[in-house]
């Protein structure tokens, strides 16, 4: 009988823990269009696979009346389960308990699953919905945040870390998602900022709403803090699941592979995709989608720095990362934001053994005082550093322009690319024909009876000599000049050849990336 009573007590405690902050607060969460912490976990993981850890944990503070407000779980649901049969660790903050605020016990629960994830080589997913540090616990709350940041840093590059911002995330809370690999934000119900609208108004006298300051649209298009924005909690969880399809469990595993049978890999439509006029734009995403396996491109950072496109895809059944200049936006130039965006993505792919494919059509770096004064030199060097450091299989396809230093930066042979292909439309030179002919033939043009006509003549001459891939190919900088229709076939063969590539960096503690 004694055991039966204990079992009943256990079941009652479980039911109490699952209620979180109570039915009224759960209903309030639903009215806002938000799922509860437990509903999110249930939707994320395979049916019946969630194993909760720390269900009965309570806070330990006795101050400011907290001794009378102990709630089981302390505002965060933690544990592990499976997504499509893959082991996953998860924490889900419960806004119905103290506003999801973080304190000592809350932080300890998160730290515990992060350490388990590192030991067992599995991704960590954080579902963030918190009002910030629990003020009543003072410095203990701050210490809890630092404990989490430290584990985020140790886990970086060891296991994938994904954050979904599904409610408020303010103050110190923002730094954990910032360290993780990918951030997903829910439109209308989530926001991130270090200091809120009221503080901003007090200090700078600026009037700004929470949505304008740190909403999903702001962080996906202006700051680049978030990689994806979605309409609701359900879409956020679907996005996490999709993202996991392209990435391995940890840094020791190879990139995911799906069944694939080789067939006729020619894509004749690519032969007509580059406009006759070299100044006319085209959409690089059309090239990407015709080269990769059908409907497998998953774009990352879609609305930020649109002059460069990054994302995952499958090619010949194997997951790859793609970096591509976008001629349809700012002519595909490299600038501060596009360099940072691409560098971050390249480093993620390299950390988790995901091969890199680069499509290059770049007229150079964006000129101007704004770019120079905001350190385009250092920021452009980030992308250069990221590619140079990458040891995964790396292939570049030059579709059109490859000018100046940008030619070097975009995964050139000189910085360690394994294979470099060029289409016949490729233009590889120090700069465009117009500017180059003005410099080289300045005296000849100035002394001519018709300077305009002479300039056009010299521009044509420069184009014939330099604006093609043949000089680079003669030097061995280009491995093969191919018809566009052959691109998919060559890439599948190239990555197949490179799948056992071994490349090690010089022995060192770590490099000093130009931050």
Image: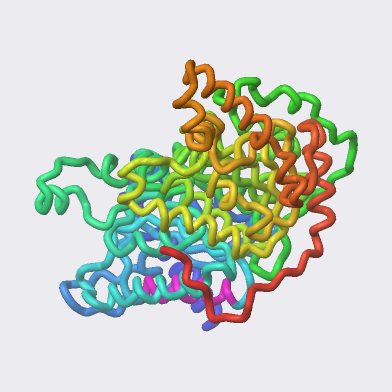
| Residue lying at 80% horizontally and 31% vertically, measured from the top left | 485
Q: Residue furthest bottom?
A: 2
As displayed, is residue 159 above or below residue 452? below
Q: Report whether residue 233 is seen.
A: no
At horizontal 41% and vertical 76% (from top left) the residue drawn is 108
Q: Position of residue 81 (x, y in %)?
A: 61, 63
From the viewer's side, name the closer residue of 403 and 376: 403
Quadrant where the C terminus sits is bottom left
Residue sitting nearer the eye, 512 or 184: 512
Q: Residue 21 occupies which quadrant of the picture?
A: bottom left
* Residue in the picture at 46% in, 25% down: 447
Residue 458: x %, y % from top left: 58, 27
Q: Within the image, what quadrant is residue 388 found in?
A: bottom right
Q: Is residue 110 magenta?
A: yes
Image point (73%, 55%), residue name = 256
Q: Looking at the picture, does residue 17 appear above or below residue 84?
A: below
Where is 117 relative to 431, above or below? Answer: below
Magenta region: which residues?
105-118
């Amino acid at each position: 009988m004694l055991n039966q009573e204990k079992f009943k007590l256990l079941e009652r405690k479980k039911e109490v823990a699952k209620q979180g902050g109570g039915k009224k607060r759960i209903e309030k969460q639903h009215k806002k269009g938000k799922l509860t912490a437990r509903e999110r976990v249930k939707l994320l993981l395979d049916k019946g696979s969630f194993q909760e850890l720390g269900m009965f944990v309570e806070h330990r503070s006795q101050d400011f009346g907290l001794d009378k407000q102990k709630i089981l779980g302390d505002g965060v649901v933690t544990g592990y389960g499976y997504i499509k049969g893959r082991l996953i660790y998860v924490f889900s903050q419960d806004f119905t308990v103290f506003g999801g605020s973080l304190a000592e016990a809350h932080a300890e629960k998160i730290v515990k699953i992060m350490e388990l994830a590192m030991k067992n080589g599995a991704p960590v997913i954080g579902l963030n919905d918190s009002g910030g540090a629990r003020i009543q616990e003072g410095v203990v709350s701050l210490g809890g945040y630092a404990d989490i940041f430290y584990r985020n840093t140790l886990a970086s590059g060891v296991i994938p870390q994904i954050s979904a911002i599904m409610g408020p995330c303010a103050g110190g809370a923002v730094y954990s998602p910032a360290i993780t690999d990918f951030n997903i934000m829910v439109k209308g119900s989530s926001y991130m900022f270090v200091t809120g609208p009221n503080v901003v108004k007090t200090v700078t006298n600026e009037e700004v709403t929470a949505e304008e300051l740190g909403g999903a649209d702001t962080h996906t298009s202006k700051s680049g803090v978030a990689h994806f924005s979605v309409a609701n909690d359900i879409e956020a969880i679907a996005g996490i699941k999709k993202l996991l399809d392209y990435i391995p469990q940890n840094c020791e595993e190879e990139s995911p592979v799906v069944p694939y049978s080789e067939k006729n890999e020619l894509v004749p439509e690519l032969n007509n995709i580059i406009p006759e006029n070299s100044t006319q734009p085209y959409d690089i995403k059309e090239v990407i989608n015709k080269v990769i396996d059908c409907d497998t491109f998953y774009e990352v950072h879609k609305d930020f720095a649109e002059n460069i496109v990054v994302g995952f895809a499958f090619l010949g059944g194997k997951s790859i990362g793609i970096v591509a200049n976008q001629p349809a936006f700012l002519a595909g130039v490299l600038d501060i934001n596009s360099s940072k965006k691409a560098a971050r993505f390249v480093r993620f792919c390299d950390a988790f053994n995901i091969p890199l494919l680069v499509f290059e059509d770049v007229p150079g770096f964006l000129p101007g005082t704004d770019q120079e004064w905001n350190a385009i030199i250092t920021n452009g060097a980030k992308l250069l550093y990221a590619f140079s450091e990458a040891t995964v299989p790396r292939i570049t396809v030059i579709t059109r322009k490859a000018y100046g230093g940008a030619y070097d930066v975009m995964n050139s042979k000189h910085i360690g690319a394994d294979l470099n292909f060029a289409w016949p439309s490729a233009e590889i030179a120090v700069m465009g024909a117009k500017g180059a002919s003005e410099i080289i033939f300045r005296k000849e043009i100035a002394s001519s009876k018709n300077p305009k006509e002479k300039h056009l003549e010299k521009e044509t001459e420069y184009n014939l000599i330099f604006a093609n891939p043949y000089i680079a190919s003669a030097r061995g900088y280009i491995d093969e000049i191919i018809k566009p229709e052959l691109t998919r076939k060559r890439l599948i063969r190239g990555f197949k050849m490179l799948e056992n590539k071994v490349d090690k960096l010089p022995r060192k503690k770590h490099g000093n990336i130009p931050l």
